[in-house]
């Protein structure tokens, strides 16, 4: 006769970081392998129906890559040629190192007034903290395969430490789950290409997420804002001064002074416009 019981993780064989590797039937002890999203399982050994309480189970998933090395490199150079980085970084930078790995993230799903939310936390030391901002669609998660171990970075951040971080996040300025609001916890290994590139004597690191092609980097040669702010500020100041000319003409009692001042303003504005535009284009070509 089938029965419905809560699943329980066995601690034996758990890798570093606190992720257990086996989920066993509560009736016969047979090993179960749920897919992402499954909460009811049928034991293939005894036929029992097992309910998996996701709030009590730590799953282990991975995301399958869709980009090869050449496509990841192309994604990197597209990012380098974008609006965030210095001009022509894709042409001036030189890739000096690259590697592929599955990087571990702690995955917490919780409920709040806005519905289900997902929070990620790096499960190993990394300088690219932007990994916490990845988006992991539920359908992309697959059961972790031990055959990936050779390319997977082992977790070094224990689950307890990640849970403490989650509590601190909840108590701080950022919105987080309530103490009992976590409905699912998992370790997720995400495929990334790690690139090191050199620019003007400095070496930078960027990650290309191999499932979506997104580029993540904390420190990079960013486009300087000061020259653009200077051009904008000077332009605003010039036209503010020109706007004062008609106001001064209107305050004068001399006949025709307003018309003359408007003409002067328009003439000077016409002269200033191409000069300021040329300056702005020059800055854009250099920065």
Image (cartoon, rainbow, N blue to C red):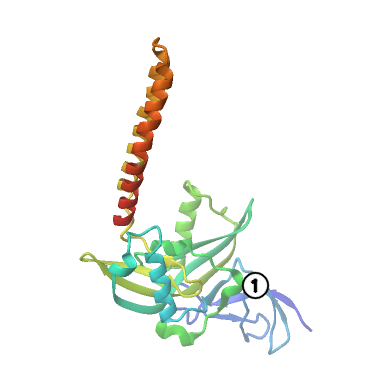
Residue at 41% x, 74% y is: 74
Question: In this orientation, which residue lies closer to the viewer: 267 or 172?
Answer: 267
The number of numbered discs placed on residues in the rendered structure image is 1
Q: Is residue 11 left or right of 97 when viewed as pictured? A: right
- Which residue in the protein does label 1 denote? 37
| Mark 1 Cα shell of 10 Å, populated few (<14), some (14-19), many (≥20) | few
Residue 33 in the image, given as x and y percentages of width and height: 61, 82
Name the secondary structure under disc 1: loop
Question: In this orientation, which residue lies closer to the viewer: 96 or 12?
Answer: 96
Q: Is residue 129 left or right of 32 when viewed as pictured? A: left
Residue 130 in the image, given as x and y percentages of width and height: 42, 62
Residue 27 in the image, given as x and y percentages of width and height: 68, 82
**Vertical position of residue 168 compared to residue 151: above or below:** above
**Vertical position of residue 165 compared to residue 155: above or below:** above
Residue 193 in the image, given as x and y percentages of width and height: 40, 75
- Name the quarter where the C terminus is drawn: bottom left
Question: In this orientation, which residue lies closer to the viewer: 217 or 248?
Answer: 248
Residue at 60% x, 75% y is: 8
């Amino acid at each position: 006769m089938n029965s419905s019981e809560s699943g329980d993780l066995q601690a034996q064989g758990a890798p570093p970081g606190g992720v257990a590797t086996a989920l066993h039937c509560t009736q016969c002890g047979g090993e179960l392998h749920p897919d992402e999203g499954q909460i009811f399982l049928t034991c293939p050994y005894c036929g029992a129906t097992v309910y998996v309480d996701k709030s009590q189970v730590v799953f282990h998933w991975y995301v399958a890559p869709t980009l090869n090395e050449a496509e990841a490199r192309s994604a990197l150079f597209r990012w380098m040629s974008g609006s965030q980085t210095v001009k022509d970084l894709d042409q001036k930078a030189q890739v000096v190192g690259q590697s592929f790995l599955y990087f571990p993230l702690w995955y917490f799903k919780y409920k709040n007034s806005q519905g289900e939310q997902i929070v990620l936390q790096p499960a190993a030391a990394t300088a690219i903290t932007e990994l916490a901002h990845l988006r992991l669609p539920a359908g992309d998660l697959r059961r972790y395969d031990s055959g990936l171990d050779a390319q997977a970075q082992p977790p070094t951040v224990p689950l307890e430490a990640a849970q403490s971080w989650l509590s601190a996040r909840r108590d701080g300025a950022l919105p987080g789950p309530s103490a009992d609001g976590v409905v699912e916890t998992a370790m997720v290994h995400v495929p990334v290409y790690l690139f090191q590139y050199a620019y003007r004597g400095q070496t930078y690191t960027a990650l290309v997420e191999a499932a979506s092609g997104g580029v993540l980097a904390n420190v990079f040669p960013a486009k300087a804002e000061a020259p653009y702010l200077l051009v904008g500020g000077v332009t605003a100041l010039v036209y503010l001064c020109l706007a004062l000319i008609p106001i001064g003409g209107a305050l004068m009692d001399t006949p025709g002074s307003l018309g003359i001042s408007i003409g002067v303003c328009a003439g000077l504005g016409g002269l200033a416009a191409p000069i300021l535009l040329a300056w702005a284009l020059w800055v854009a070509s250099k920065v």
